[in-house]
Structures are given as structure tokens and as C-alpha cells.
Image (cartoon, grey):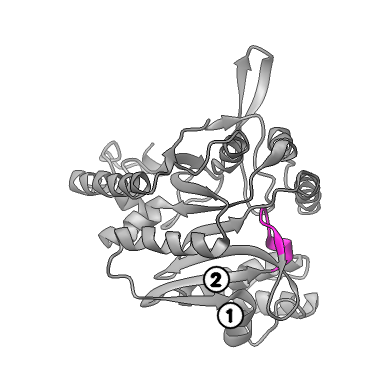
């Protein structure tokens, strides 16, 4: 905790907060011109994210059902998909989201997530719209480059992330991380290599869009076949200036597969000694009722504002980060 007597003050200058408000108004104008409905969904839910590498926060509350455990949402995704299944059409949200343990120059426990969904849109169409939104706030961003996940590992680390042995990945990740990785599973090694060796080199003098992730990293995205005939996740991530800004999916609409992915996530969490998370049965029910074919994307709006205003940390574009809240 910041012990300074001045810690009651906001970490962002008032002039910066005025600029932040102007940029958020630009985001709302962007979607209003495209006929995308702004929605609000709950911060608290009866389920959290089971994703293995995310840690949710929870609390206990008194409800009409008695004392219940409720989860602070890591993103508004599940509730927004329930709106899609109910016939909302295209929607967007600037949502408060929470991720335990994520504090630093580019992270804060509580942050603002911009998330939007486009029924009947291809992933390619959503990539184009995501780029257009980013250029609205970063008009001087350079050229767009489309990069395959597999090619990045081959070019930068001389390893194939799909076919390399687990032992080889553990050895390479150990070298980059400076710690023993002998007990870490395949995706844990790939995540470390991506974050430490590859991501810092992405988005330099342009916008890098990474596609074709390993199928084990699909989360809530479909599986498709890539140009080499291998199964991959139909998702993309966007990088600018070494920062991951956005994560988009061609959304999974199969209820049974979604339920199995939630269960597998919790099995993986158990293997890693992490607490289990209540999976979202309401989302599975919405998928059973019929989620329209859709593409959706989540974008870290604090990071985008940080880049737009040329600040070194997201705390400089927030009123009160975790250390001062």
C-alpha cells in the first residue's frame, strides 16, 4: 500500500482524466455510428471464469437465497453472450472487470474492459473493425501485420510450439524465465515464452495481429483447421508497442463442448493446486437455447488510453489504482 501522505490524491492528473473522458466518448461515438447497442451487465455473478491462467475474486453476500458466494467478473463475456442468445443483436460494453494478482505497470486488479459482439460476422470482419477502433484513438499507428502464432515461435525462438516435445519447451522456458520449469505443463511454458520472448517485440511501428493459436488455448473460441492442416483456435490478439490490447474469438456455440471445456479447466486448475471456480451453467443454458453465430472481442481500454496519451503506466490514466483505492 502507498504510505505517502499524498496517497489520497488521484494517480492521474485532472487534465488526463479530462482526456480519458474525451476518448471514452469517442469509443461510444464509434459504436453509435455503427448501430451497436451499449449494454450494462452485472459486476457480480454466481459463476466466475474457470480459465486456468486467470484468478477470480469472490465475496459472500446475503441474497433472497441466503448467504451465497458471488464472483467478481474477469470480463463481461458470459452475461453479454446471454444477451446475444436472447436476441440483442450487436452489443458493446465498457465494463469494470477484476483479476486477482494482476498489479503492475500494465495491470490493475480493477480495470475497464471494452467488449463487443457482432452476430453473423466473420473473425476477419471483426479484426478489421478492431483495427478501425484502435486507429480512432491512435491515428498515427503504423501498418497492420498479420502474424501466425506458430510462425512467431519458429522465427524468434527456432522452435515449433505445436510439435516440440514438452521437455524441450520446459528447457527453453526455463532459460527465458530463469526458473525451473520441469513441472510446468505445455501451455504454461508457451505462455511464458510468449510473454517474455515474443510479446515485447510485437507492435513496434505498427499493429501486429496474431492468429491461429494452439487448440488448447481456445478458451471460448471455435477450433478450425489452419493452412498447414492442423487444428487451431479461431482467435486473434492485437499488439501495439509491445502491449497486448485485444483478444478476439470466433465464438464457440456448442453447449456440450463449452461445458466440457469448463470441466477440463477445473481439472487443470486442480493439477496446478489452484482453487476450483464455479462454472457458468447459465451460459451453457444460453448456448443450449441457441447462441447466434458471432465473433466477439475484449480490449483493455486503460492500455489503449495509456498509448493514446503517451503515458508510461495505466495508473497514470486511472483516477485511483489499487494502491490508492
Report x, y in % for residue 319: 31, 41
Name the residue at 64% across, 45% down: 292
Query: Which element type, helix, strand or loop, lies under badge 2?
Result: strand
Q: Quote the CA–CA distance across marks 1 and 2.
A: 9 Å
Tell whether 197 sits left or right of 66: left
Tell whether 32 sits left or right of 92: left
Q: Nearer the viewer, residue 123 or 206?
A: 123
Quadrant of residue 288 in the image? top right
Report x, y in % for residue 33: 33, 47
Tags 1 and 2 touching, CB below 8 Å: yes
Q: Nearer the viewer, residue 6 or 160?
A: 160
The residue that label 2 is drawn on is: 210
Name the residue at 40% across, 44% down: 35
Residue 84 lies in magenta, yes or no? no
Q: Residue 69 carries which label?
A: none
Q: Give the range drawn in magenta.
A: 214-223
Q: Which mark is residue 152?
A: 1
Query: Which element type, helix, strand or loop, lies under badge 1?
Result: helix
Amino acid at each position: 500500500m502507498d504510505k505517502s501522505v499524498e496517497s489520497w490524491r488521484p494517480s492521474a492528473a485532472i487534465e488526463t482524466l479530462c482526456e480519458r473522458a474525451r476518448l471514452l466518448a469517442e469509443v461510444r461515438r464509434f459504436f453509435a455510428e455503427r448501430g451497436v447497442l451499449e449494454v450494462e451487465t452485472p459486476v457480480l455473478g454466481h459463476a466466475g471464469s474457470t480459465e486456468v491462467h486467470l484468478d477470480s475474486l469472490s465475496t459472500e453476500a446475503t441474497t433472497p437465497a441466503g448467504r451465497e458466494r458471488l464472483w467478481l467478473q474477469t470480463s463481461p463475456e458470459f452475461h453479454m453472450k446471454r444477451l446475444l442468445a436472447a436476441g440483442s443483436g450487436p452489443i458493446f460494453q465498457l465494463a469494470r472487470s477484476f483479476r486477482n494478482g494482476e498489479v503492475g505497470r500494465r495491470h490493475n486488479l480493477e480495470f475497464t474492459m471494452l467488449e463487443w459482439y457482432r452476430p453473423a460476422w466473420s473473425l476477419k470482419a471483426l479484426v478489421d473493425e478492431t483495427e478501425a477502433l484502435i486507429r480512432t484513438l491512435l491515428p498515427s499507428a503504423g501498418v497492420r501485420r498479420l502474424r501466425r502464432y506458430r510462425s512467431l515461435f519458429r522465427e524468434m525462438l527456432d522452435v515449433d510450439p505445436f510439435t516440440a516435445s514438452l521437455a524441450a519447451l520446459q528447457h527453453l522456458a526455463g532459460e527465458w524465465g530463469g526458473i525451473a520449469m520441469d513441472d510446468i505443463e505445455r501451455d504454461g511454458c508457451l505462455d511464458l515464452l510468449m510473454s517474455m520472448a515474443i510479446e515485447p517485440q510485437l507492435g513496434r511501428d505498427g499493429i501486429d495481429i496474431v492468429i491461429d493459436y494452439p487448440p488448447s488455448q481456445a478458451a471460448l473460441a471455435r477450433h478450425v483447421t489452419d493452412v498447414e492442416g492442423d487444428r487451431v483456435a479461431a482467435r486473434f490478439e492485437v499488439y501495439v508497442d509491445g502491449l497486448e490490447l485485444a483478444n478476439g474469438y470466433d465464438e464457440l456455440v456448442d453447449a456440450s463442448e463449452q461445458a466440457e471445456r469448463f470441466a477440463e479447466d477445473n481439472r487443470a486448475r486442480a493439477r496446478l493446486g489452484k482453487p476450483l471456480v464455479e462454472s457458468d451453467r447459465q451460459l451453457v443454458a444460453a448456448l443450449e437455447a441457441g447462441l447466434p453465430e458471432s465473433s466477439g472481442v475484449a480490449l483493455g481500454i486503460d492500455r489503449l488510453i495509456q498509448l493514446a496519451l503517451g503515458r508510461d503506466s495505466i495508473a497514470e490514466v486511472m483516477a485511483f489504482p489499487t494502491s490508492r483505492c
